[in-house]
Each structure stands twice: as C-alpha cells, then as structure tokens.
C-alpha cells in the first residue's frame, strides 16, 4: 500500500524546511521526512550552537583583558554547565520555531523516520511507502575519523558529540587544523583548556594563502594554542592509567607523544548518502558518495533534486539555503538560476574572524592575467586601535583590466561582516572604484576599504 503525494523532501537541514513550506504553499501535497532532529547540522551541532559557544568564549577572553581598558573585574572563571545551558536554550528556540512553522503549514506533513528509496519516485519510511513525482534530498553529512591505528579503542569527540560537553577539558587534542578544528581550538583555550592541534599539512587552512595561514597560527599561538604540523601518521592509545588519550606522532621527522584528556576529530566530513537506497532509484553518486547534480541541482533521475552538503556543490549553511532558492525559483517561478551564478564566500569564525570572498591570491596568480593587490595591517585602522583589536590584515585582489574585484581575505575585527561590502560589489559587477569613491562613515572598520583600494599595486607573478 503506498501513499501518493506531490512532493517528498528527505532531511530537514537548512534547505529543506523553506523548500517544503514553499512547495506546500504552492498547493503541492508535501511530505517532509526527518530521521533525527529538525534543522540539520546548522541548528543542532553546527553554526548556531558553536557560534553561541564562541560568544561565551569571547566574553571570557575580553573579561580577562578588562584591565587593558581600565576596567577591574577580578578573577575570571567559566561555568561550562551554564555555558552549555545557554547554548541549549538558543538551539531549543530555533528548533521550536521550525516545529511551529512546519506544523502550522497546510499541505505539509512531517514524518519521523529514516527514508530509503525503493524506486525512482518512491521511498519507504517506517513501513509506509511514499510516492511522488518530485523528490528532494537534503540529508547533509557527518564527521569522519582519521585512519589512525588504535583510534577505535579510545573515546573520540566530533562536532556533534562536542555539543554534549559541560566541563572544561584539561587538555583538548584537536586533530585537524582547518575551519572546524581551529574554531574549537580557540574556543576551548579561552574556556581554560590546554589545547594542542595536530595538522596533516605543512600549514593551517591549506586552501587559504600562506600569509593568511601564518597569521591565523600566530593569532592562536598568542593565546596559548600549540600546533604540530605535517602530522602524516599517528597511533592512538588510552592515556596513562587508562584515562584520556595518548597520541604518538612523527611531525616533520621527529617523534612526539601528546597526552590529552579529550580527543576531537575535525578532519573532514562525508555525505549521508550511503544508506538511502540510491542504487534502487538509479541516482548517481561520485567516488566520495556525493550525489551528482547539474547546474540546477537535478540528479541523474528526472524529478529528483539534491540540495545541501550531500551534493558536493557547497559545504555551508548559506550555500544550502541558496540551493533551496535556486530550486524553488526554477520550479515555481519560471526562473533559470544556476549554481555557478553564486560567488564563493565563507568565514572562519575565530576571533578575529576571516571573511573570504572570491579567489585567493594563489588562484588569481594561476589565471596568468594582470591583477592588482592591496594589503593593510589592522594596526593602521583607527577603529581597531580604539577597540584594542589590531590583529590581522585586510587583502583585496582586482582584475587590472576590467577593474572588477576578484577576491578578498579580511582577517580582522568584523571581517565576517565587512566582506559583504565587497561581495555585493562583485555580485553587482561593479568597478572597485565605486567603493573607492564612496564616502564611508567614520570611525568604522569599513571606511578603510576605500583607503585599501587606493593602494592597489600590480600583483607580481611568482
């Protein structure tokens, strides 16, 4: 016995609730299937909870620096149970809002359970077969562990299980010196943990330019985070006395043993596509398990779309939401929006944050075309000096012939917000001179972007 409907949305990550509601409001009988919790990674163990923790960690950090501003606060302590309770409350409100929104939408049914395809347009959930001419997959991804001997014999935390911690680890060992790992490293150092980061590459956040990687490392080292780079292999065992963990590594040709109370794996993620029965539907995936999609996010099966982390076309909440916008506009509004229309933009939410848009310097050099570059240390920015936040720098890259902005790296106070000024100019296909000649408010950090652009000079080829 099957249940017919007009649309099925599998998973309730960032793209799914908006898409399901939009489809239902358009008159389609829609079923949203979720196996664990509403909101996906972002709401439950990604953006919302981690940035809530980051806010608590920054508060502790600023309180410790209070004397620099002429403010006396006394000894600063961190109550992790209260920190976690605050995080849980923020997450709870988000989930409650989703629940009410979905539950209050006509034509939309929420089904709890694990969906598996039984055919191109049919899925089975808890013994019920749902059939629809339109199916949308938004199942997200999960953390993976490094393939180190012994790692299965010790407790290992990831970005999900880390959300349950309500104590300050004595010594947190983070495997992975990229975006997730670095955010947790600084966060828990500020909470009071000793923190050691083990990174496979010869530098942090390898997709960024070397000057960005180096400055990020310096910023975190000033706070006491310890780094070991070029950690290609390691073995893991329980720590002395059976508590904690012991990681024996060989970074840069020298043997080293790191004893930690907790081990956090932040080395990458994989899509949640291996148990969906995609083979029964004929839905193609690549070698890593990501669902193959075209520019409009259509899969190899007509009438089936894949959105969010599972399609390999973006690994961020904002790209997942943009996937929803693309699919909804094309399906319901007669538009022809494409994934390639969007600009690459993201942030590393350490403090100060790194706001990124467009190409890196290495990518600009690889074009082999004339380009301009400008870099400004934050020590030159009055607002940063006033706030005692002068770490980092701003860098922008411009095409020398078209005057179009190619990319920017803003590792600075409010860099995750300021970057949108450049993003908007790029989206509007504006000459950089439009920003350069605009009058900005003083005193702000953004007002130095025109000054930065005034200092553009030819980018030397390597």
Image (cartoon, helix red, strand yellow):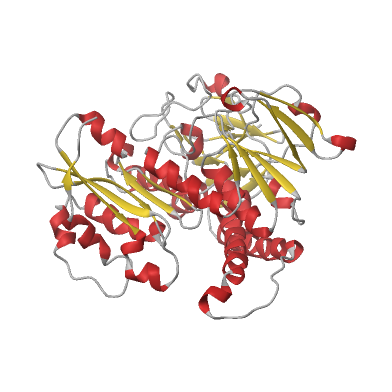
Residue nearest the observer in this picture, 419 or 362: 362
**Residue ranking furthest to the right:** 241
260 lies above or below 279? below
Residue 39 in sight in this render: no
- Residue at 67 percent of width and 66 percent of height: 86
Q: Quadrant of the N terminus?
A: top right
Q: Position of residue 428 (x, y in %)?
A: 20, 53
Total of numbered circles in the picture? 0
Q: Is residue 272 left or right of residue 370?
A: right
Between residues 206 and 304, which one lies in front from this camera angle? 206
Which residue is farthest bottom?
Answer: 71
Residue 141 visible (yes or no): yes
- Residue positioned 17% across, 40% down in the render: 371
Residue 452: x and y in percent read 23, 57
Q: Quadrant of the C terminus?
A: top left
Task: Kindly give the residue lying farthest to the left in the view shown.
Answer: 401
Image coords of residue 221 (percent x, y): 55, 49
Left or right of 328? Residue 53 is: right
Up-down relation of residue 338 to residue 325 (above or below): above
Q: Nearer the viewer, residue 318 or 203?
A: 203
Q: Closest to the observer: 114 or 433? A: 433
Q: Where is residue 5? Give x, y as percent.
A: 53, 41
Residue at 81% across / 40% down in the picture? 244
| Residue 280, quarter of picture | top right
Hey, which quadrant is residue 379 in on the image? bottom left
């Amino acid at each position: 016995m099957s249940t017919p409907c007009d649309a099925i949305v599998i998973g309730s990550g960032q793209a799914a609730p908006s898409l399901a509601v939009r489809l239902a409001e358009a008159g389609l009988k829609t079923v949203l299937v979720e196996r664990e919790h509403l909101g996906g990674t972002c709401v439950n163990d990604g953006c919302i909870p981690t940035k809530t923790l980051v806010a608590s960690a920054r508060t502790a950090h600023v309180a410790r620096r209070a004397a620099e501003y002429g403010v006396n606060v006394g000894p600063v302590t961190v109550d992790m149970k209260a920190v976690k309770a605050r995080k849980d409350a923020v997450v709870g409100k988000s989930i409650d809002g989703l629940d009410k929104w979905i539950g209050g939408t006509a034509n939309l049914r929420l089904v709890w359970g694990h969906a598996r395809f039984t055919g191109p347009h049919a899925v089975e959930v808890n013994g019920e077969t749902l059939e629809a001419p339109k199916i949308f997959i938004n199942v997200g991804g999960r953390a993976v562990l490094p393939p180190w001997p012994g790692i299965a014999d010790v407790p290992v935390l990831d970005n999900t299980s880390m959300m349950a911690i309500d104590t300050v680890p004595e010594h947190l060992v983070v495997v992975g010196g990229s975006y997730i790992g670095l955010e947790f490293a600084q966060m828990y150092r500020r909470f009071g943990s000793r923190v050691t980061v083990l990174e496979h590459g010869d530098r942090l956040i390898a997709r960024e330019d070397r000057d960005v990687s180096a400055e990020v490392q310096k910023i975190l080292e000033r706070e006491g985070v310890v780094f070991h780079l070029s950690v290609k292999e390691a073995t893991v065992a329980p720590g002395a006395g059976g508590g904690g963990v012991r990681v024996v590594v060989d970074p840069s040709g020298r043997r080293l043993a790191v004893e930690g109370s907790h081990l956090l794996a932040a080395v990458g993620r994989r899509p949640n596509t291996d148990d969906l029965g995609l083979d029964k539907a004929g839905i193609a995936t690549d070698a890593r398990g990501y669902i193959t999609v075209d520019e409009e996010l259509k899969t190899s099966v007509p009438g089936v779309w894949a959105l969010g982390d599972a399609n390999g076309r973006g690994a961020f909440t904002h790209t997942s939401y943009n996937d929803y916008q693309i699919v909804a506009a094309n399906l319901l509004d007669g538009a022809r929006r494409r994934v390639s229309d969007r600009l690459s933009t993201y942030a590393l939410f350490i403090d100060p944050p790194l706001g990124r848009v467009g190409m890196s310097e290495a990518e600009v050099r690889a074009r082999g075309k004339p380009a301009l570059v400008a870099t400004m240390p934050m020590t030159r920015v009055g607002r940063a000096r006033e706030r005692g936040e002068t770490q980092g720098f701003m860098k922008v890259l411009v095409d020398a012939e078209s005057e179009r902005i190619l990319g920017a790296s803003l590792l600075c106070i409010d860099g995750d917000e300021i970057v949108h000024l450049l993003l908007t100019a790029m989206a509007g296909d504006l000459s950089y001179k439009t920003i350069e000649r605009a009058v900005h408010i003083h005193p702000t950090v953004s007002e130095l972007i025109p000054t930065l652009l005034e200092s553009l000079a030819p980018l030397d080829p390597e």
